Amino acid sequence: MILIKNGLIILDNKLIKKDILIDKEEILDISDEIDMDCEAIDCTGLLVMPGAIDVHVHFREPGFTDKETIKTGCLSAAKGGVTTVMPMPNLNPCPDCYQNLKLELDLISRDACVHCYPYGAVSRGENQLEASRVEEIHDLVYAISDDGKGVNNASLLEDVMRMAKKYDLVIASHAEDSVDGYLPKGEYVAVRREIELAKKIGCRYHFCHMSTKESFEAIRKARSEGYTNITCEVTPHHLVLNEEMIQDGNYKMNPPLRSEENRLATIEALIDGTAQMIACDHAPHTEEEKKREYNKCPNGIIGLETMIPIIYTEFVKNGKISLNRFLDLMVYNPISVFHLPKRDLKKGFVADLAILDIENPHTYTKDEILSKGKNSPFIGKTYYGFPKYTFVNGKLVYKR
Ligand code: DOR
C-alpha cells in the first residue's frame, strides 16, 4: 500500500486537502485524514489529479525508432503526468490490418509504462486508395486515423465512415485539403467538407489539432445544430504560440503556427467548449533532422512533458479556465469522446495519478527531456505545474 498524504485534489472548482490510499492497482480510499502504517509520500502543496489522457501522440515504433520508441515515448508521457496515450498509425508497418497492429500491440505490452491505445489506419499504409482492414482490427482499437495526411478521397472516406459507425469507432481527422495544403484554407475547406459527410453518415468524427478561426466556426455551428458526434482537439502550441514567434525548426509542425487572430480563435474554442480536449501531437524527430534549414526539416515538436504545465500556467492559474474544466479537457472528455476505460480520482478506480508542483515554477531544460526527440520550442520556458510524481496502475512510473 502507498499513502499519498496532504495532497490537494480538485472538488467543485476548489483545491481540497485529502489523503489517498493506494492498494495494488486501485484507489482504496480518499479521506480528510488517513493513517496507515505503510509507505507514505508527503504531497503538501501538490495538486493530485487523475493522470491526463492524450489522444494524439507519435511514438514511431515500429519503423522509426531513431526518433522515438514506445518505451521512451511512454517515459516522456509519464514525466508529463500523462497516463494514457493514443499513438498515431504513421508507422512502418502501418497498423492497417490485424497482423501489423498485433506487432505494435506486442511492443506495447512489452515496453509501455503508461496505458497505450494505438490507432488503426483509415487507409492501407495511409495510401488514401484502399480502406484499411477495419473489420480485422475494430475490437483492438478505439479509433482510426490517417494522421499526417488529409483524406482527400471522398468515396474512401465515406466507406470508412460507414465502417466506423458500424463498429462504433472514432475517426480522427488530420483535415488538410490537397489544393491548399497546410495553409489555413487547406484546413477549413477540408473541415467543412468532412463535417457534411460526418453529418450524413453520423459516425463519431474528431478533428485533430484545429488551428483556424473558420474551422472552429464550422465545428461550433455543427455542434449547435446537435451534431455532437463531431468533436475536436487543440494543441498547447497553437494556444500559446503564433507564426511571428517562429525561430527555427523547433517551431515547425503541421498544422503550422498561425496568425495571432487564429491563436485567439483557438483560445476562444477552448474556453467556450467548441474544443473538447487538449492533445499535444507529440512528434519527435532526430536532432540531425530538426537542425536542417527550416524548409528542409520535418514537421513536428515533442509536447508530452510540457502539456500540463503550459495549460496549468497559461489557463488555469490565471483563471481563464476553471479547475473542473481543466479536468474535463485533460481527462474526462477524451474518455467520453473516445469511449476509453473510465478513470477518476475516486475510491475503486485504477490509481493513475499526476501529482503536480503548482507552487514552484520550473524552467524546462533540454537535459531533462526523456523523449528521444529534443525538438521543443518550450526549452528555456518557465511554468508551474510540472509533475513531481506520476502513478500508473498504482505504480510509481515517474519521480522528479
Ligand atoms: O507536425 C506534425 N508531425 N504533423 C503531422 O501531421 C505529422 C507529425 C509527425 O508524424 O511527425
Image: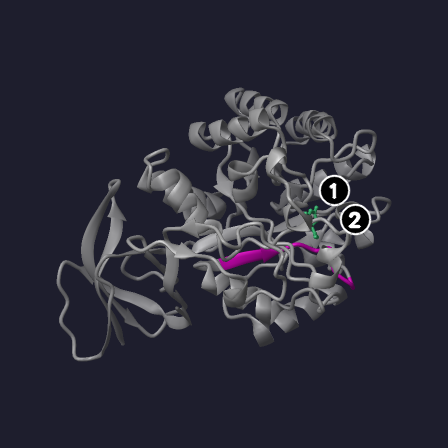
* Contact? badges 2 and 1 (CB < 8 Å): yes
Residue hosting label 2: 123
Magenta residues?
84-93
> Dot 1 surroundings within 10 Å: few (below 14), some, or many (20 or more)?
many
* Residue in view at x 27 percent, y 60 percent: 347
Tell me if the residue at label 1 has its CB under 8 Å from ligand 1. Answer: no
Give the overall secondary structure of the magenta segment: loop
Q: Earlier in the sequence, mark 2 or mark 1?
A: 2
- The amino acid sitting under disc 2 is Ser
Horizontally, residue 195 falls left or right of residue 268, namely right
Report helix, strand or loop for mark 1: helix
> Dot 2 surroundings within 10 Å: few (below 14), some, or many (20 or more)?
many
Report helix, strand or loop for mark 2: loop
Relative to 21, residue 11 above or below: above
State yes or no: residue 91 in magenta: yes
Q: Give the position of the N terminus as an image quadrant.
A: bottom left
Depth order, front residue of 219/97: 219
Depth order, front residue of 56/301: 301
* Residue in view at x 81 percent, y 54 percent: 125
Residue hosting label 1: 160
Of discs 2 and 1, which sits in the foreground? 2
Position in image of residue 294 (x %, y %): 75, 47
CA gap between label 2 and label 1 equals 8 Å
Q: Give the position of the C terminus as an image quadrant.
A: bottom left
Position in image of residue 127 (x %, y %): 84, 49
